[in-house]
Amino acid sequence: MSILPDDFTLLQVTPELETGGAEQTTIDVAHGVVALGGKALVATRGGRMAARLEADGGRLAQMPAQSKNPLVMLGNAARLIDLIRREKVTLVHARSRAPAFSALWAAHATRTPFIATYHGVYNAKSSLKRWYNAVMTKGDLVIANSEYTRAHVIAEHGVHPDRVVAIPRGVDLSRFEPSFVSADRVETLRKAWGVASDERRLKVLLAGRLTRWKGQGLAIEAVARLKALSDTRVLLLLAGDDQGRKGYRAQLEHMIAQAGLEDSVRLVGHCDDMPAAYLLADLAIAPSLEPEAFGRTAVEPQVMGRPVIAADHGATRETVIPGETGWLAAPGDVEAWAQALNDACEAGAAGRQAMGMAARARARRLYSVDAMVEATLKVYARVMAARKAGADVLESKG
């Protein structure tokens, strides 16, 4: 199977398969391995994306991989050792810190190549937390999901640059393809979200789970600031699951009510049809208060031909080109975000369309899932070749 052996079996280890960029990348890589004739296993607690994994030909190995309990982690290591031996796993790929400990122990016990993907820039305010984070660097190689993340890994953990490879997260161009999204799909979403068919306001979409650092509160404040200036040209759509954060959702609802924005801001909940959501919108925003390690919600809308306003830090500096594919606004600065929304309105439909076309061309070139999968498989091949070379050297010395 191309650069990998015919009997290649990949084991990815990730906490859950609910929703998110790391989870989607897990599914994408599994699909790529299966498409080339290999076997793809995912050890995980499970979740709503498990059905997609199995539909693509991958296999679920269910275990409490999300647990940070040391005893459970030891139990997971034993389960993984058994799985690796039973399925003749060729390579283990961890995608989160807690399960990475179990995966690393199991890989060492079975002498199986091990790599990890640094999907986020983890905070470390103590030496213990830095040690905990460093588990992601203990394998044969580290994959970083952006140049921003790669620079962080090298600086934070003192890893040699040759051992850290940046592979930007990929977008499925067959799924995020405007011509494949029917008018009925957009219409269904429009009705579900209560957006009038003759809505003339700028429809602004913020897609992301409801958590404080994603910046929903900042976006609401920016719309409130515009309203205070008698600017009512924006309809803000907040699409995302609260994942049990009822208190934060209630706080957002209170902010909306206090500012009298019930007609200007909608909490529309989880969305299963993001391609249709981006087509329904005129503009997407990614106002994260902390730097994004990649930020797929700034890339997916660009693939769909929509310009983006993103926070001016982290990897979005790589994915959004100011004045060409969108705008960058100062993180956490309400005035800057109100101004950016005003600039997007002032650009007019023709200006936004031109930016959207430029964004689509660039994002399709740089951030396809096919390119991401191919680069990942090359890393697998590189690690296996290095292992074989090392074994050959030992054998010759023996």
Image (cartoon, rainbow, N blue to C red):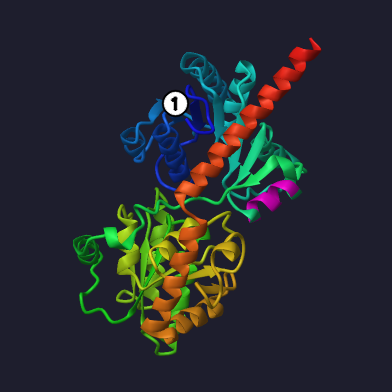
Which residue is identified by label 1? Answer: 63
Query: Taking 260 as reference, is 193 left or right?
Result: left
Question: For the point 46% across and 71% down, which residue is it?
Answer: 358
Q: Give the image quarter of residue 313.
A: bottom right
Does 321 sit above or below residue 368?
below
> Which amino acid type is marked by label 1?
Met
Is 149 a magenta residue? Answer: yes
Q: Residue at x 72, y 18 (%)?
A: 392
**Magenta span: helix, strand or loop, mainly?**
helix
Asked if residue 395 is among those painted magenta in the image, a careful observer would answer no
Among the 4 quarters of the image, the one containing residue 235: bottom left
Count numbered badges in the picture: 1
Up the image or down, 13 lies above or below 190; here it is: above
Query: In which image quadrant can residue 266 be found?
Result: bottom left
Q: Residue furthest bottom?
A: 230
Magenta range is 148-154
Given the current orientation, which residue lies at the most extreme top position?
A: 398
* SS at badge 1: loop
70 relative position to 218: left or right: right
Residue 295 location, x and y as percent?
51, 57
In the image, residue 281 above or below residue 152: below
Q: Between 396 and 379, which is closer to the camera in this rendering?
A: 396
x then y, percent, for residue 84:
52, 19
**Which residue is nearer to you in this view: 296 or 8?**
8
In front of the other: 25 or 234: 25
The residue shown at (45%, 75%) is 355
What x and y, as percent, mark residue 369?
Answer: 46, 49
Is the C terminus in the top left, top right, bottom left or bottom right quadrant?
A: top right
Residue 373 in sight in this render: yes
Report whether residue 307 is seen.
no
Residue at horizontal 56%, vertical 21%?
77
